[in-house]
Image (spheres, helix red, strand yellow):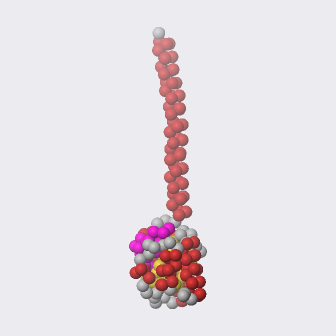
Amino acid sequence: MARPDKADAVAELTDKFRSSNAAVLTEYRGLTVAQLKTLRRSLGENAQYAVVKNTLTKIAAREAGIDSLDDQLFAGPTAVAFVTGDPVESAKGLRDFAKDNPNLIIKGGVLDGKALSADEIKKLADLESREVLLSKLAGAMKGKQSQTAALFQALPSKLVRTVEALRAKQDEQGGAE
């Protein structure tokens, strides 16, 4: 029979997995408490960094419906960044912190139920934030709308100029006869 404290821990981790957009597993061996505090701040407001027990985390991931995590990710001391907001922002925070502190090792993770390798998380960190991508998309759409509007305005004005040119030519030919 499972101890009540372990059952509570699994239930809490399961809730975190279910309520998160992404989860990134890291190895934190060799980091000081002060460095972990700095890491937690660098992840932003939409991420929670928690040191976890491997066996309880595996059970919680399975209960949350995440079967895609490899068992090798749960070797050694593990901490999980549970991301509820923009996963790019948190991935950038982890990547930048890992550059300055080589003791932090990004093992892998999960994004919307799909397993990610450490390299894929680093690629995710290289993306621009959601807001920047949306503003670029909106700018591109606005540009296309402006081009379309100019095209629709050009057609009638070109037609009017052509009709005026034909009328002027007819007036010349009519005046010459």
Within the image, what quadrant is residue 119 found in?
bottom left
Q: Of 125 and 174, which appears nearest the observer?
A: 125
* Magenta region: 106-120
Residue 168, image x and y in percent? 50, 21
- Which residue is rendered at x = 50% and y = 80% of the image? 59
Residue at (51, 90) in percent of width and height: 32
Quadrant in which the N terminus appears: bottom right
Q: Is residue 122 visible?
A: no
Predominant SS of the magenta segment: strand
Please determine whether, in this image, residue 55 is positioned above or below residue 17: below
Relative horizontal placement of residue 135, taking residue 107 as reference (left or right): right
Considering only vertical position in the picture, is 104 above or below 116?
A: below
Residue pushed farthest top? Answer: 177
Count of marks placed on residues = 0
Position of residue 63 relative to residue 32, above or below, is: above
Q: Is residue 170 visible?
A: yes
Q: Residue 68 at what x, y percent from top left?
A: 44, 72
- Closest to the observer, 42 or 9: 9
Q: Position of residue 166 (x, y in %)?
A: 48, 22
Q: Residue drawn 52% across and 79% down? A: 60
Q: Position of residue 20 (x, y in %)?
A: 55, 72
Which residue appears at 54% of the width and 37% of the height?
Answer: 153
Based on the picture, tell me whether residue 51 belongs to the magenta stretch: no
